[in-house]
Each structure stands twice: as C-alpha cells, then as structure tokens.
Image (cartoon, helix red, strand yellow):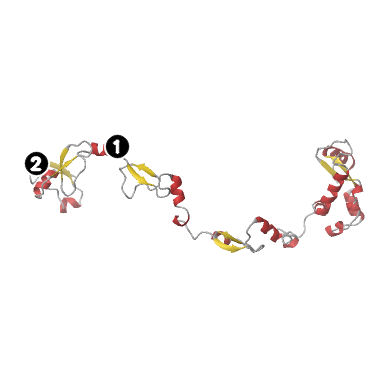
C-alpha cells in the first residue's frame, strides 16, 4: 500500500510502500539518506569511488565503496576473486558477486569429488572391514552391506569354487528336483564320455571317415548304437554306465563331420544322433 508522507527535515512530499507491521510500529520519517543523517545529527562522510575515482557522500553507519550500481557491477566483472582449491591447492578465479558462504572451494568438479570421498562423504558408514577367507584363511577387506546376504565369505572366486566342489551336486544342490536329468544326458556330460570322444578324434587325426575333410566341426559317432548298448546291459544309473567296457571302447567310435553325421542318421536312425 503506497502512502504519501512529508519529510521531517526538508518537508518534501514522497511516496512509500508500507508492509503491514511497518505502518503501525516503524513508519518512515525521511525522504533520503541525507535527511536521515541531518535528522539523527550524524554528518555524511565523504568517500571516493573505487572504480571511477569520483567523490560522493555516504552514510557513516554503512559506508559505500562505489558511487553507483553501475560502478559496482563494473568492479565485480573487472576484478574476480582469486581463491585456492581445497583439494589440489591450485589458485583459480571466481565471480565477486558471491557471498563468503556461497563461494567456490574447488577449482573443478573432479577435485570436489575427490575431496568428498571416504570419511568426508555424507554417506560414510565406516568403510571396509577385515574378514578371514573360509577356504584359505587369508585376511581380506569387505563392505558391511555384503555381509547381510552372504552365507560364506571368500577372498576370491577361486576360493569360492574350491569350497563348493562336490558340495552342490545331487540332492545337496538347492536346484535338485529328485533326479529328473535323463540317463543319456548324464552319460554324455560325464568326464569319461568326453575322454572317449577325445581319444576317437586323436586316433582318426581329426578327419572325417566319410568325406575326408579336416578342420571342420566333427562328431564322435557310435558304430554300435548308444541306445542298444544301454539296453543290452540293462544300464539304469550313471555308475553302471561308467563300469561298462563296451560303452567306452574307442573301436566302437568313428569320426564324422557334422554334415556326414546328420546324413547318416537321416538314412538309418530317423534323424537321432548317437
């Protein structure tokens, strides 16, 4: 709300906008700073503008450094502040129109990030803690949040693998479903089957018996069908298959390339590979 008032010193009429509380308790009495000094019996001080060198009058309780806002803006742009980086100690320039609290403390975002790492970070929770490996007994560092869901603690993946060898097989495995893997798949994924296949390839010099090609994808083919041998000896478990000599006889195997193997089973075995 704008109100017309009379200055108590010079009698000049001026307009002033009151804001609630001021209208009742602290009404304005003077039209300018000069009249304020005369009314309070405090003389104006003479000062020199730091930008243009012009002399001007200023109030004694809050002396000004510049004669106008134009000079103050020019001064801020002309002479930026020189500050020292808290992280690397490098001297850098910053704008003058920032308060002491809001001034920059770092020369770059990289320095700020490096300074706020570790204990200086607001999210610091004590850092890594020392623990002992359950496999090799070696001490290693681990974050506290990793302990929440870890049943066992290891210093490396190698130690974790050594610890779990033989402990996650069969009914000890959490994914065990009562032995639903077919017998043929158990035999083909066993070490003894891989060894038999490797011996057949080495004997034939990695060459296909049918087309004589070498350096292509090859398969180990059973001369006497895999299924016939299992039915003949009534093999029902993997342990029985591992002790069957005829199943692992390399004379019962030949090397065929992928194309020849597919064509053979298409003619004689209705497409089923053996």
- Pick the front one: 139 or 147: 139
Where is residue 216? Give x, y as percent: 81, 38
Secondary structure, mark 1, is helix
- Pick the front one: 178 or 186: 186
Looking at the picture, does residue 51 appear above or below residue 245? above
Q: Quadrant of residue 230?
A: bottom right
Q: Which mark is residue 78?
A: 1
Where is residue 267? Give x, y as percent: 89, 39
Image quarter (top left, top right, bottom left or bottom right) of the N terminus: top left
Q: Quadrant of residue 162?
A: bottom right
- Pick the front one: 226 or 119: 119
- Pick the front one: 66 or 168: 66
Relative horizontal placement of residue 199, taking residue 29 as reference (left or right):
right
Q: What's the residue at 69%, 57% (across, down)? A: 161
Where is residue 179? Give x, y as percent: 77, 58
Q: Which residue is mark 2?
A: 12
Q: What's the residue at 46%, 49% (across, down)? A: 113
Looking at the picture, does residue 250 appear above or below residue 166? above
First-in-chain label (1 vs 2): 2
What's the CA distance linking mark 1 and mark 2? 39 Å
């Amino acid at each position: 709300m704008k109100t017309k008032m009379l200055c108590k010193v010079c009698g000049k009429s001026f307009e002033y906008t009151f804001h609630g509380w001021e209208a009742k308790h602290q009404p304005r009495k003077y039209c300018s700073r000069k009249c304020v000094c005369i009314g309070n019996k405090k003389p104006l001080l003479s000062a020199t503008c730091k930008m243009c060198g012009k002399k001007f009058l200023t109030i004694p309780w809050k002396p000004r450094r510049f004669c106008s806002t134009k000079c103050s803006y020019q001064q801020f742009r002309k002479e930026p502040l020189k500050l020292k980086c808290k992280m690397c100690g490098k001297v850098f320039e910053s704008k003058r129109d920032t308060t002491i609290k809001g001034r920059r403390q770092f020369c770059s975002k990289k320095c700020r990030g490096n300074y706020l790492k570790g204990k200086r970070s607001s999210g610091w929770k004590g850092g890594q803690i020392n623990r002992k490996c359950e496999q090799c007994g070696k001490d290693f560092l681990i974050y506290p949040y990793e302990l929440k869901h870890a049943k066992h603690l290891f210093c490396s993946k190698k130690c974790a693998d050594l610890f779990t060898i033989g402990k996650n097989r069969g009914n000890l495995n959490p994914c065990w479903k009562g032995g639903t893997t077919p017998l043929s798949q158990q035999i083909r994924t066993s070490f003894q089957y891989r060894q038999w296949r490797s011996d057949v390839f080495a004997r034939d010099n990695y060459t296909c018996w049918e087309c004589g090609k070498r350096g292509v994808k090859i398969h180990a083919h059973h001369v006497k069908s895999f299924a016939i041998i299992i039915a003949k000896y009534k093999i029902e478990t993997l342990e029985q298959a591992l002790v069957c000599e005829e199943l692992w006889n390399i004379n019962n195997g030949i090397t065929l390339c992928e194309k020849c193997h597919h064509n053979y089973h298409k003619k004689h075995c209705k497409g089923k590979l053996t």
